[in-house]
Amino acid sequence: MSKSVVSEIRRNHINELLRKGSRMDERAPLDLREISVETGVIDTAEGSARVHYGQTEVIAGLKMAIGTPFPDTPNKGVLTTSMELIPMAHPDFESGPPGMDAIELARVVDRGIRESGMVDVESLCITPGEAVWMCFIDIYAINYDGNLFDAAALAVVAALKNAMVPASNYDKGEDFPLPVTCVPITMTAAKIENTLIVDPTFDEEMVCSARLTVTTDGNGDIRAMQKGKSGAFTVEEISDIVDLAREKGEEIRKIIG
Amino acid sequence: MSKSVVSEIRRNHINELLRKGSRMDERAPLDLREISVETGVIDTAEGSARVHYGQTEVIAGLKMAIGTPFPDTPNKGVLTTSMELIPMAHPDFESGPPGMDAIELARVVDRGIRESGMVDVESLCITPGEAVWMCFIDIYAINYDGNLFDAAALAVVAALKNAMVPASNYDKGEDFPLPVTCVPITMTAAKIENTLIVDPTFDEEMVCSARLTVTTDGNGDIRAMQKGKSGAFTVEEISDIVDLAREKGEEIRKIIG
Amino acid sequence: MSKSVVSEIRRNHINELLRKGSRMDERAPLDLREISVETGVIDTAEGSARVHYGQTEVIAGLKMAIGTPFPDTPNKGVLTTSMELIPMAHPDFESGPPGMDAIELARVVDRGIRESGMVDVESLCITPGEAVWMCFIDIYAINYDGNLFDAAALAVVAALKNAMVPASNYDKGEDFPLPVTCVPITMTAAKIENTLIVDPTFDEEMVCSARLTVTTDGNGDIRAMQKGKSGAFTVEEISDIVDLAREKGEEIRKIIG
Amino acid sequence: MDSDIVMVDDNGKRLDGRKADELRPMKIEAGVLPNADGSAYLEIGKNKVLAAVYGPRECHPRHLQNPAKAIVQCKYNMQSYSVGDRKRPGPDRRSQEISKITAEALEAVIQVELFPRASIDVYIEILQANAGTRCAGLTAASVAVADAGIPMRDMVPSVAVGKANGHLLLDLNKEEDNYGEADLPLAIIPKTNEVVLLQMDGHLTREEFDTAMKMGVTACHEIYEMQKDALRRRYSVAADEEQEVEE
Amino acid sequence: MDSDIVMVDDNGKRLDGRKADELRPMKIEAGVLPNADGSAYLEIGKNKVLAAVYGPRECHPRHLQNPAKAIVQCKYNMQSYSVGDRKRPGPDRRSQEISKITAEALEAVIQVELFPRASIDVYIEILQANAGTRCAGLTAASVAVADAGIPMRDMVPSVAVGKANGHLLLDLNKEEDNYGEADLPLAIIPKTNEVVLLQMDGHLTREEFDTAMKMGVTACHEIYEMQKDALRRRYSVAADEEQEVEE
Amino acid sequence: MDSDIVMVDDNGKRLDGRKADELRPMKIEAGVLPNADGSAYLEIGKNKVLAAVYGPRECHPRHLQNPAKAIVQCKYNMQSYSVGDRKRPGPDRRSQEISKITAEALEAVIQVELFPRASIDVYIEILQANAGTRCAGLTAASVAVADAGIPMRDMVPSVAVGKANGHLLLDLNKEEDNYGEADLPLAIIPKTNEVVLLQMDGHLTREEFDTAMKMGVTACHEIYEMQKDALRRRYSVAADEEQEVEE
C-alpha cells in the first residue's frame, strides 16, 4: 500500500475532476461503486462471502472449532480476525506476515464486529470455563483497487450472517446457524483537497490526505471509527462523515438483506 | 545450492567428457562414487550414521522421546525428519532456518522412509491415544559435493537399522531395537544434455537440466519419487531411471547389510 | 553497540588523558561515576529499580506468576532474565529481537544473580513438581553511555531486594517479601592501551581492547565473570580486577543498603 | 485403512460415479483478476483455485537476479478456510515444496531467456481444497502465464494418478484419497509428451507405475484442451471488448 | 458488566473524585534523555510514559526514503512490567496499530517537506500503564519532537473520552475502563481545532458522539497548555545552562 | 546436590580415574573437510567437535564490513542429537553467547589487519557433547584457522577448570559437571600467557580462583602441543601428497 506513487498528472486530474464534482470512474463524490455480495462461496468454511466494491474483491471465510475460553471471559466464545494482503491482489503487496496495513485492516474490521455485538458470543459457550466455540475469521484481499476496509467488513458480515456452527462434527448436537444480533456496516470516506468522497479507489487513496472509517449499527449508532493518513479533518467534516456512514449503512444493509 | 555458477569452460568440459562416456572423476555415467557407511558414530543418539558418497558427507542421528500421538493416528508412533544445510558444508550454504532446498531434501527423504513403511510405527505405540514414541531424525550435511538426496537417505536408513529404543530411560522396560521392516534405497539420476548419469557431483548438479530421485524397496517396488530442476524427461528416460534405481538399490542394500 | 566508530582524534585524546592518569569526565582510572538507585519506580511491577551510572540509565522490573517448575528442579521457583536494548537508549540500537549484545548482557546479569543464590528459589516452591513462582526479570536500557553490565546488574539487585511476592492475587495467602539471601555486586573493568579503568563510558568502551566483568558476593567470593572484546589480559591484570571488584562491591553494597 | 470400502463397483464406477480413468468435472476461466498481468480461475471437482501472474518485472531481492534469464518464482498457498481444520496463514514445509516444483515446471516452458534479470512471479491460491490441489494449481498457473502474454513453448497440464484399494484411479477426490495407497502427480509438455513435474509416494509395482504414467499423460492431454479452450474464450472476449472500444 | 458500580455519584464525582470532564493529574518534563535529539517524560494518573526522538537522520531501510519529504516512523512499546500480567517483549498487533496512527498524527504537524529522504524516528515507551497510554504517548512524543528542535506547525495534544455505565467521562482510568462502554481517543491541532487522530470503539449515539468530541477537544486545549509549559521550562533551563557556561 | 558422591577418592583419582589436574584423552585432526578453507576434528573425552573456516572472503551483510580489518564471525552450534534430550535446531541464547566470545578470542590472534573488509567465518559443530564443548570448539577452531593458512600470532588452546564437591578439577566431564559448584572456562595465547577468553560461574574464593587459573593455564599449554602436533601431521601429509603429485 505504500510503494506506489501516483504520477503528478494523475493527481492533478483527480483534483481537477473533483473540483467539478466528478471522479475518474464518473461517480459523484458521495456515490459508492457497484457492490456485489455472494455468500456460501467456500464449502469448506462454516460461512463465507465474496464481495466486490467495483474492482476491489475480497473473500472472507469463517472456520470454527472448540477450544478453551479466555480466563477473564469463561462463558464467551472467541472471535479472531486476520487479514491477508496476498501478493496476488496488487503489485505492491508482498509475501510474508501481515504488515502494518493488514494489521490495521483486521483490527478495524474486528472492532466493528466485536463492538456491535454482532455475534452473540455468550451463546457460543458450551461449558463455562472449559469449552467454547472459537471463530476464526480470515479475510483475503483478492484484487485491490481501494477501500479494503469497507469491502472486508462487508464480506465478514455477510459470511457471519450465513454461517452454520458445525456442532455435529464435534458430537454437540445438530448444526445451527451462527447466532447474530445485528448487521454493522462500515463506510470509509476520504478527503482530497477540501472535498469529501466515499468509497475511494486505489488512486484516490494515494491522493487523499485523510481517511475516516465509521461503523454503524441498524439504529444508526456508532460502533467503531478509525481515522487514517497524515491529513486532518475538521470537526464538521467528521460530523458529515458520520451522517454519511449512517445513510450508506442503511443502503448497504438492504443489499445483504 | 543456488548461488554458485559453473564457468562455461567447466560446463563445456563436463559436456564433452560425457559425450565420450566419461566424467570429471573418471566414472562411467551410470557408476556411483565410492560409498562408505559408518553406524553408531554418535553416542548421544538412539541411532546414527555417517555416510560418504565420494566427498559428500552427511551425518544422520535419531533421537526418541515419549509424546502424544496425532489424533487421527492414535496407535502410531511419530516420525519427523529435518535436514540442515549448515554453512560448514559448502560456501553457498547460509545460516538460518531451512530454505527450500533443505525442506525438499527432508521431505523426499521422509517420504522414502514413511511410504516404504520401513519403521513399524504401530509397534511404537505405548498407550493408544496417549503415549507413543516420537522419532526425531536429524540430518546434517557436513561436506556437500552433490547428491545429498541419496547420501541423506542412506544415512537415515543406516541410522534407523541400528537404533535402539531407549525404553529404560522412561521406565518402559528394557531397551529394544527400533523395529524396521525393510530397507528402502534412494537413487538419483540427472540429465546432462541427453545423457543420464547417476550420483551427480556438485558440478554436475549445476550443469544438469533435470534430476529424478527414486526410492525402491527390497522387492524392487517404487516407494517415492521426486523430479527436480526445470528440464524435462521423456517417459522412456523415466522408465530407464526406475530400472537403474532398482538395480543400484540392490547394490547398495548389500553395503549396509 | 557495534555501528559507532570513535574518531581517531577522540581515541587519541582518551589515550593521552589516561597516560596522565585522567579521563574525559575527569575521573581517576579506578573511580566509578556517580551512581543513583531508586526503587519502587514501577507500581505494576512486583519490584523495580531505576539506576544511573552517570548518564547511563536502566530500569529493571520483576513480574511474578505461578507456573510449573522444570522437571529436573521440581521444588524450585524459576528465574528468567531479559535485556532490551531499545532504540530509545542509543542511536546505534535497533528495533527487533535481542541481538548478541543484549543476550550476553542478560546472561551475564542472570549468572550473577543465579550463581550467588541471591534469590532463595526453594522458598518459591508452592507445590513441588506442580506450582512454583516464576520470576520474570526485564531490564530496559533507557539511556546508554557505557557499562550496561554494571548498571543492569545493580538495577536487578535493587529491584529484587525490594520486591513483594503477589501471593494474595493468587489466593496463596498474604503478600510477602521476595526471599533474598545476599547482595551480589557486579563490576566491570576495561583495558585501554596498558591501563585498567573501571566503569567505562561509551567512548571508553569503543576504545578499550578488552573488558572484564566480575560479580562478587558479600564475602568477597567470586560468583560470575565474563571477559569481552578481542584484546587480552595478563593473569596479573585479571587478579587486579578481581581485587577491584571486591573493593567496589563493598562500596556499592553500602549504597543500596 | 478400511478395506471394506469399495473404490470401484461391479460396473466399474467409483464412489462419485466416475470411471477409473475419468477426470472430475473441470472448468477454467482466464483473465479473472484486473490487477494481475495474467490470471485464471479453475475448478476441478470441489477444488477451487486462483492463479495470478505478475511479470516479467524487476526482480527482488536483487541478489536473485540472473543476468542470462528471468527467474520464475512461485507461491502456492492454501487459504485458511480451504480445508477441514483451519490452516494457519503462512507457508509451511509442504507448500514450500509445492511452490518449488511448480516454479520449476513452469520454467521448463516459459521463454525465460527473453527476459534477463527479470522475475516472473506466480501466485496460486487454493480457495477450497479437495485433493489434487498442486496439479490444479499448476494447470491454472499455466493458463495465467499465457494470459499474461508471456512467451511459452507450450502449456503445462497437470494431474495426479492414484491407487486406492488396489485400483489405479485418475484424479482422486478427497474421499478416495483417504484410502489412497499411492499418489503420482505429474505434468507434461503436451507437444512432446515430456515430463516436467513428477512425484510419487506410496507403493507401486513396476507395472503399475507404467500404467499410471500412461493414464496421467493421456489425461494431461484432455486438460490441455480445456486450457486452450479457456484461452480461446478469453481472447475472443478481449477481441470483442477491443472492437467495442473501436466502434 | 456489573452495573451496580456507580461511576458518578450524587455529587457528580467519579471513583477517584474527579468530575466527568476532568483530566487526571498530569505532569510533563521535556529533555530527560541525554542521547536522544529530543525527549519527554509524562505522567497522567498512574501512567508513566517516556518519548524520545532521533532525527532528522538518514532513513533505514533505504527503500522507505521519500525524495520529497522526511518519513515519520514511530514505535510504541509497552514494557514487560508495565501491566498486570507480564507482557512478552516485542511488538504485538495492538502496538503496531498504535505506532501507525501515532506516526500519522505527528506527521500532520511536522514540517516533513524540509527534510527530504530523512527519517524522524519516534520511540514511545510505556513504563507503567493505567488506561489511556496511546494518548499519553502521543502527547509526550509531540513535546519530544519540539524538544528536538524539529520545525512543527503546532503540537498535538491527545486524550480519550470514554463512556462507562452510561456516563460520558473524560480520560478514563483503568478502574473505570474495566466498565467502559465506549472509548474515543482523539488528538487535535490546537491552532485550528482540526482532528489528526480519531478512533472509536463501543457504542455511542449520534448525540453522545457530538458531546464526546466537544469534551475531547476542550481537554486537548488544557493538555496543550501543559505541553507548552513543559517546553518553556525546558528552554529556560537550557538558557540558564548556557548562561552559566558563558559566565 | 548429593554430597555423598565422592569426586576424588582416597588415591586422588576421579570418577573416570583421572587425577585432579589431568585432561581427558584428546585427539585432534586437521584438514578433515574438503570444501572448507580450513578444518579440524577434535575429540576430548566423549566430546566430538568439528570446526571449519571459510575465508578471508567477501563480507556479508556488507554493513558489517570494516575498512580497517577483517571481521571474525563464529557460529557455535550443538547438533540436535548431540545431547541427552534432542535440541531443537537453530541458535539459542547460550549458543549465541558462546559464538560471540569464541569469535572475540580468535580475533585476538588472527592478523585481521591484513584483510580489510573481509570476513573470516568460523563454524563449530558439536556432534556429541559431554561438558566442555565451548573450550573444545575454540581449541578446534584455532587449528582450523591455522589449517586455512590464515596468518595468526599464535593459536588459542582452551580448557575449563571446575569445582565439584569442594575439589578443583581440570576439564570436568558431564558426570562431574552434574555436581559442579563452579566452572571457569578460559583460553590463552601460549606465547605470552595472556588470557583471551574467560568466564566464570558458581562460587570460588579468591584463593580457589588463583589456583584454578594456574591449573587452566598449565593445561592450555598441554593442549597447545596437541594443536601443533595436529598441524605438523597435516602438513606432512600435505607435503607427501604434493610429492606424490610431483613424482
Image: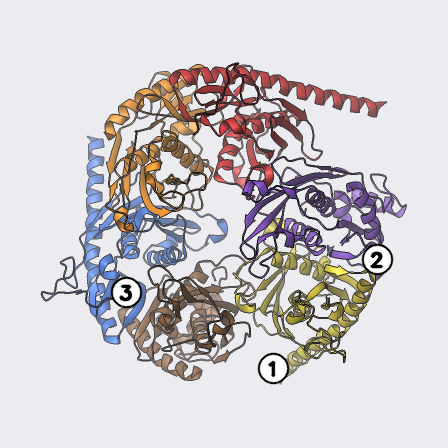
Chain colours: A brown, B purple, C orange, D yellow, E blue, F red
F135 or E210: nearer the viewer = F135
Chain for disc number 1: D
- Across and down, in percent, residue E146 comes to 28, 49
Q: Which residue is mark 3?
A: E183
Q: Which mark is residue D245?
A: 1
- Across and down, in percent, residue B68 comes to 54, 53
Image position of E245 with respect to B14: above or below:
above
Dot in front, 2 or 1: 2
Chain for disc number 2: B
- Across and down, in percent, residue F204 comes to 40, 21
Quadrant where the image shows the N terminus of chain F: top left
Distance from disc 3 to disc 2, alpha carbons, whole Å, reads 70 Å
Q: Of the residues shown, which amino acid type is indicated by label 3?
A: Asp
Residue at the extreme right: B20
Q: Of the residues shown, which amino acid type is indicated by label 1?
A: Val
Side of E178 relative to D134 (left or right)? left
Task: Say if residue D1 shows up in the picture.
Answer: yes
Query: How dense is the environment of label 2, judged by Cα within 10 Å: few (below 14), some, or many (20 and up)?
Result: some
Image position of D133 with respect to D17: above or below:
above
Chain for disc number 3: E
Q: Which residue is mark 2?
A: B237
Dot in front, 1 or 3: 3
Side of E177 relative to D87 (left or right)? left
Query: How dense is the environment of label 1, judged by Cα within 10 Å: few (below 14), some, or many (20 and up)?
Result: few
Q: SS of the residue at dot 1? A: helix
Quarter of the image holding residue B146?
top right
